[in-house]
Amino acid sequence: MGRALKYAIITIVSVVLVAVLAAASLAFWIDPNIFKDDIEALAAEQGLTLKLEGDLAWQVWPNIQIVINGASVAPKDDAEIMRFEQAQLSVALMPLLNKDIIVQGISLVGVKASLSVDENGKGNWTSIGKQDSNTPETPTPADTGSQPLQLAIAKLALSNSQIIYSNKQTGQHIELDGLSLSGSDIQLNSQAFPLELESDIRFTDSQQSVEASIHLNSLITVNSDFNDIVIDDSTLNLSLEQKNELATLSVNSELNVGAELKLGDTVVWRLPKLSLIDTDIRYAGSDGSDIEISALSLNGSVIPGGEVSTITLSTGIRYSATTQAPIDTQLKLNSGLRIDEDLNAVNVSDLKLTAQVGNETMTLNGGANATLSPLGYQTTLTLLPSNLKKVANTLGVELPAMAEPNALSKVGAEVTISGDDKRINVSKLRTTLDSSIISGNASVGLGDSQAIKLALNIDNINLDHYLPPVEESKQETTTKQAETPSPAGDTEVPIPRELLNSLDVDAKVQIGALTANQLPFTDLLLQLNTKNGVSSISPLSGSVYDSPFTLDAQLDSRPTEARMLMKGSSKQLPLGKVLKDAAAIEQLSGISDVSFNLNTSGNTVAGLKKQLNGNIELSAQELRLSNMNIEKAFCQLVAKFQQETFDATDWPMFSDLKDTTTKITIKDGVAKIETLSSGVTKLVLSGNGKINLNDDSFDVVISTRLAQADQNEMACKINNEKLLNRDIPIRCKAAFDSVGATSCLPDFRVIEDIAKEKAKEKINEKAKELIDKKMGGENGEAAKQLFNQFFNK
């Protein structure tokens, strides 16, 4: 038994020695180059033309190793797509017996790959791997239930390589030059291994060119099923420059990342570490503008389903242009971020964003929640009050000129915004605008329904503070009127009918106190509704100079010519203050009740003005007409009639009207004074005339009447009774912007009328004397009556 065992052991050892010697003999005695043709033929079966240009070398013990010294690869009957200077593969022999692959080394040197797409969109690599239709398919071996393949690579190296891609369809050209990839102890056993990648990248197309350089160092862990990947302590250094006709963009950055990826029915990922260090970005525009983002730093993590992670960001921004001195801004961001495990819900908490612009700091605080399915979001933001005017000046933003030097010195806001795929809601709005507080809410529909709802409440606001300053003029009022721009400049402004027809607006605005054009409004209420092409204001109400007013208006933009209706009224309206502040008109002052009912149509402002129709009624106890003296005009006529010298000096440049009632009818933009009843001193006035809104002029004839009992209270003495108890016409005619002392003049034709009456009376007296003398008695009286009837015709 012992002897048999001895012979058995000797036999086994002999077989092993023979096997080893046989393998060694293959390595030393068999030249691998004799297999070149077989290897090239095998590649041809895969649609490849493989040329092994250099010698092959191999070894068997202790590792199986093969070295290829130069080769090129091309699709069958096509141009070369890849070549390399040397390829080396080394595999441990003994682990192969257990179906474990332990790669001692993989090395590729001088790889040159050229990939291209032709005009038809076909790549030069698409035929690779396609077998001839007559070649039978190799049957897939049945699953034997064996252990998964174990892979380990002791050393991996790719060096001095280049990949070129060009696409004739898109005009794109990409080059990876100086490409190198290295790693060691690469195993699929959840053990970390280092990997390093480096390359220069060039990209061009018809619109831009990009040059970049990347350098990546990372520790990677992969399990045997290749579905659990961990990237740890990964550092990416990037240098990039992009150019086009408009600008040049350059980036220098270092990115540190830690990532975890699990592949399965769903992809689960985590970014335990995300860090951007000392990143510089510069945008240099061809127009001379220049934006520099310097020392950009970002730190944080993103862990779906985990706890809230902190995100911090800081950077400096500098902007300059050919006409703008450099502007420096510092930004800082701190926030909490949480994403749910399903990547459906996002929560941003404790958000604080500060911007240091010059000497002014702007701070935004808030938070937000959002879901993707169903879509929903809500954010609450607070902008702390800051001097917006200083910020704008520092940023080189030219604001319109404003009358108040301190306007926009305190601007802040609080707002909550929420919504979904159907509507955006703005609630809890509270805005600080200098000394004003604006609060309210709004909503805007999305999709087919774009309805807008708005409710605003303003405690007080002076709009004049935010308008250009009024130029103080030292000239006379007439000069100021002459310098007032004519409304004709707006004549061709079109009515935005298409916009009005598409709007769906329901708005309510309440203002406690409002100053506009120096007019002090209080308790303002505006209710606006626009839908289906009909816009209604019902009402616009409030008080101006403590005079209550109300206005209702409607604009129908559906017809070819838009139609407008307006009606309104005011009690005890101070006309002088309103006209002076609103339109710089100082010719009329006093307190009056006003009511109007107007309508018009047209497609432009000019058309609406030209086709204005309706009526206006005024009732005032006291009115004053400036630059016009009706009593002076009356006395001027008296002096001429009585053939006296008229002294035009020392007359006041106004007329005070008592108990005035006026009814004005407007037709096609021309206002006609139907009735005018008033009084000046002891003159009783009545009249009619026209006010043309199209050319801003008026032509009014005022009839003055003086009773005999009142003649002593006039500034001029009346010696002829013919001037008493009769209508003396005064004609007032001028353009609104040129009213002066000569705008109201007497109609001297009345003197001719009086002379005719006097001649008629003398003829009548002579005739009566002649009849009495010739006929007398009853026949004489009959003749007088007959004469009077004939003469008065």
Image (tube, rainbow, N blue to C red):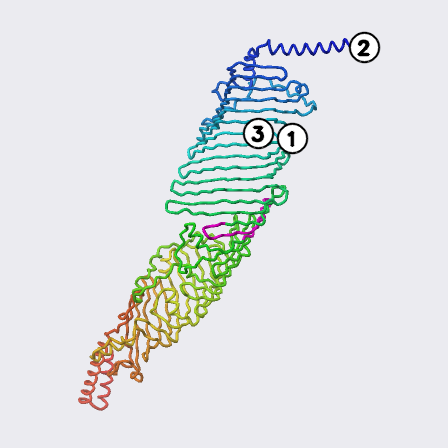
Are the two marked residues, 2 and 3, in contact with CB atoms closer than 8 angstroms? no
> Could you tell me which quadrant the C terminus lies in?
bottom left
Q: What whole-number distance in Å separates the C-alpha atoms at marks 2 and 3?
A: 56 Å
Q: Residue furthest right?
A: 1
Q: Which residue is mark 3?
A: 195
Per the image, label 2 sits on a secondary structure element best described as helix
Q: Residue 137 appears in which quarter of the rendering?
A: top right
N-term mark: 1 or 3: 1
Q: What whole-number distance in Å separates the C-alpha atoms at marks 1 and 2?
A: 48 Å
Residue under the image location 51 percent in, 50 percent down: 354
Q: In the rendered image of this protein, does residue 112 appear above or below residue 217?
A: above
Specify whether 295 is left or right of 675: right
Q: In the rendered image of this protein, does residue 216 appear above or below residue 717?
A: above
Amino acid residing under circle 3: Leu
N-term mark: 1 or 2: 2
Q: Which residue is mark 2?
A: 2
Residue under the image location 22 percent in, 88 percent down: 780
Res. 190 mark: 1
Q: Residues within 10 Å of mark 3 (few under 14, many from 20)?
A: some
Q: In the rendered image of this protein, does residue 614 appear above or below residue 113?
A: below
Residue under the image location 60 percent in, 14 percent down: 59
Amino acid residing under circle 2: Gly
Is residue 75 in view from this perspective? no
Q: Residue 732 appears in which quarter of the rendering?
A: bottom left
